[in-house]
Image: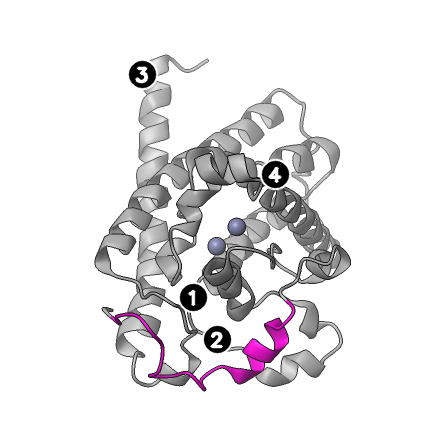
């Protein structure tokens, strides 16, 4: 059993490594899309009633550090449960098709987990004390992706704990799910819509989450609670009714949004 000081060293060094990796990836996406591509991508920019400024990004970076720390506790719980023989994680070699099946199952499980908690977090008391932190960002950008209150970060990230206790998830699938989760989150908070309009005409693709779908959640602060898909919102009648119209109309407002464009 490692001593308390050595546990602290492990926690701090993990947080440091994760933070450097996270900010390098998110910073690179921000630099390419928001700075270098600002002019080229202006017709893909999603409108918002108030524009992002450096104070918002500074605040988001601070909350991101809290989220990464909370993520370390979920990871620690999985490692601890696995070491104690309480997790059903599959460490063996698994066929690629099986791994793919587990990835799809994991995405579906996390999608429902996120939708359920997210709707609860919009209950007035939970919203005021917890979820408001994330919703302070109206004009979302890559740095908004992990900008959460500590309680929300633990709730949303802990889907992985029941998943590994109940299901024999292959290790490789778990790793891929973490990476997909990060990129989905950044895509949802990109502030730019790059998905083609025709995806709305493709049976399976039309149900995927998009940057427009989640941006509407931030600008209107209601509806569109989904993470990976629109399925749960459609099923429970919480989808913002004009989502598809806004998705198709993108670009029409370029240069005519209200508020100050500071970045
Ligand atoms: Zn919300
Ligand atoms: Zn968000």
Question: First in sequence: mark 2 or mark 4?
Answer: 4
Kindly identify the residue that appears in the image at 29 percent across and 43 percent down: 62
Q: For mark 4, give the secondary structure.
A: helix
Residue 96 at x, y percent in the picture: 70, 58
Kindly identify the residue that appears in the image at 69 percent across and 31 percent down: 165
Residue 118 at x, y percent in the picture: 59, 46
Measure the alpha-carbon separation of dots 3 and 4. 27 Å
Ligand 2 within 8 A of label 4's CB?
A: no
Measure the alpha-carbon separation of dots 2 and 4. 29 Å
- Colour pattern: one colour
Whether tag 2 and tag 3 are in contact, CB under 8 A, the answer is no
Whether tag 4 and tag 1 are in contact, CB under 8 A, the answer is no
- Checking the image for residue 5, the label placed there is 3
Is the residue marked by circle 1 packed among few (<14), some (14-19), or many (20+) residues within 10 Å? many
The magenta stretch is 241-261
Question: First in sequence: mark 4 or mark 1?
Answer: 4
What residue sits right under mark 4 in the picture? 160
Marks 4, 1: nearer the viewer: 1
Measure the alpha-carbon separation of dots 2 and 3. 46 Å
Marks 2, 4: nearer the viewer: 2
């Amino acid at each position: 059993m490692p001593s308390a000081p050595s546990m602290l060293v492990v926690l701090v060094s993990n947080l440091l490594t994760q933070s450097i990796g996270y900010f390098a990836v998110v910073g690179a996406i921000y630099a390419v899309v928001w700075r270098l591509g600002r002019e080229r991508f202006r017709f893909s920019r999603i409108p918002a009633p108030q524009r992002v400024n450096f104070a918002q990004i500074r605040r988001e970076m601070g909350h991101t550090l809290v989220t990464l720390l909370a993520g370390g506790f979920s990871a620690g719980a999985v490692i601890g449960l696995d070491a104690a023989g309480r997790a059903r994680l599959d460490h063996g070699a698994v066929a690629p098709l099986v791994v793919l099946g587990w990835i799809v199952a994991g995405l579906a499980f996390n999608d429902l987990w996120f939708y359920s908690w997210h709707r609860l977090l919009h209950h007035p008391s939970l919203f005021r004390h917890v979820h408001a932190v994330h919703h302070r960002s109206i004009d979302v950008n890559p740095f908004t992706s992990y900008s959460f209150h500590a309680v929300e970060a633990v709730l949303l990230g802990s889907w992985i704990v029941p998943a590994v206790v109940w299901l024999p998830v292959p290790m490789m699938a778990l790793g891929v799910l973490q990476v997909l989760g990060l990129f989905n989150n950044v895509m949802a908070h990109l502030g730019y819509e790059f998905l083609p309009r025709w995806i709305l005409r493709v049976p399976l693709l039309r149900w995927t989450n998009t940057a427009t779908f989640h941006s509407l959640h931030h600008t209107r602060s209601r509806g569109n609670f989904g993470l990976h898909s629109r399925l749960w919102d459609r099923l429970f009648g919480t989808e913002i009714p004009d989502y598809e119209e806004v998705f198709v109309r993108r670009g029409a407002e370029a240069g005519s949004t209200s508020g100050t464009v500071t970045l």
